[in-house]
Image (tube, rainbow, N blue to C red):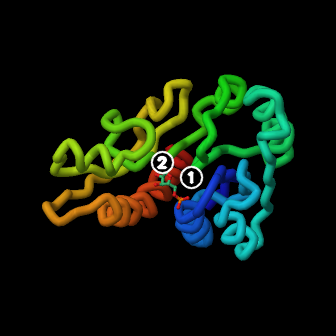
Amino acid sequence: MIKYPIGIFISGRGSNLNSIIKSCKEVEFPAEIKVVFSNNINAPGIIIAKENNLEVITLDSDKFKSTEEYDEKIIKLLKPYNLKLICLAGYMKILSKKLIDHFPNKILNIHPSLLPKYKGLNTHRRVLENNEIKTGCTVHYVNQEMDGGEIILQREVKISAEDTESSISKKVLKEEHIIYSEAIKLVLTK
Ligand code: GRF
C-alpha cells in the first residue's frame, strides 16, 4: 500500500487530527502525515502531534500584512513535503485564493453539519433553534466559497427531544472521527 504524504491544518483541540493519526498507523491506510500546520501557537492539537512525533509548523498570522502574504509563506514552508492532500481539521482561518489555487482539488475540510445546510459557525445551535430532526457532518473539497466545495462524504446523526448543543456536538464529533479518514482514503485511492 502506497502511503501518500498528507498535511493536517489545525487551530485548536485536534480531535480530528488524532483520529487521522490513528488511521495513518494502519498498514492499509493510504496516507502518512508529513506535517501538522497550526496558525495558533497555543493549539492543544500541537501537543497531540508532538506526542506522535509529527513535524509541526506554527505560524502566527499577526506578523503578516495580509492573508495572501501569510498563505504565500505557508506555500513556501510546505513545498519540501510534496503533499498529496491537505486536510483542514478545525482550521479556523479562511484560505486565500492563492493557497486554494496552489493545491487544486487537494484541500479537504470537515464541517459539523449536513452541507449545504448550516454553513459557517455555531451549526448545532442553529440546528436546535430550527427544530431539525437530524444533522451530521460533511467532508468536502475546499473552494473559494466557505463550506461550499464538492461534497465527498456525509454522515447523519438523529436529534432527539433531550438533545442539547453539547450532546449533539459529541454525537456529531464521533461521526467526524470516522468519516474524515474514510474520505481521505476515498480521495487518495480513486
Ligand atoms: C470540528 O467540529 C470540525 O467539524 C470543525 O471544527 C471542529 C474541530 O475539532 N471544522 P477538532 O479540533 O478536530 O477537535
Q: Residue at x 69, y 51 (%)?
A: 7
Q: Is residue 30 left or right of residue 141?
A: right
Q: Residue at x 51, y 54 (%)?
A: 185
Name the image quarter holding residue 116: top left
**Residue 100 at x, y = what percent?**
65, 29
The amino acid type found where label 2 is placed reads: Ile
Q: From mark 1 to mark 2, how far is it between C-alphas?
A: 6 Å
From what the image shows, is residue 24 above or below residue 150?
Answer: below
- Which of 84 and 169 lies nearest the eye of the viewer? 169
Q: Secondary structure at mark 1?
A: loop
- Which of 78 and 84 lies nearest the eye of the viewer? 78
| Residue underneath mark 2 | 110
| Residue underneath mark 1 | 89
From what the image shows, is residue 51 above or below residue 139?
Answer: below
Name the image quarter holding residue 50: bottom right
From what the image shows, is residue 59 above or below residue 169?
Answer: above
Q: Ligand 1 near label 2 (Cβ, under 8 Å)?
A: yes
Residue 150 got which mark?
none
Q: Is residue 99 left or right of residue 164?
A: right
Q: Are marks 1 and 2 in contact (CB under 8 Å)?
A: yes
Q: Residue at x 50, y 25 (%)?
A: 145
- Which of 162 and 170 lies nearest the eye of the viewer? 162
From what the image shows, is residue 53 above or below residue 107?
Answer: below
Q: Is residue 125 left or right of residue 71?
A: left
Give the residue furthest to the bottom.
51
Name the image quarter holding residue 107: top right
Q: Secondary structure at mark 2?
A: strand
Crowding at mark 2 (Cα within 10 Å: few <14, some 14-19, many 20+): many
**Residue 123 at x, y = what percent?**
36, 46
Q: Ligand 1 near label 1 (Cβ, under 8 Å)?
A: yes
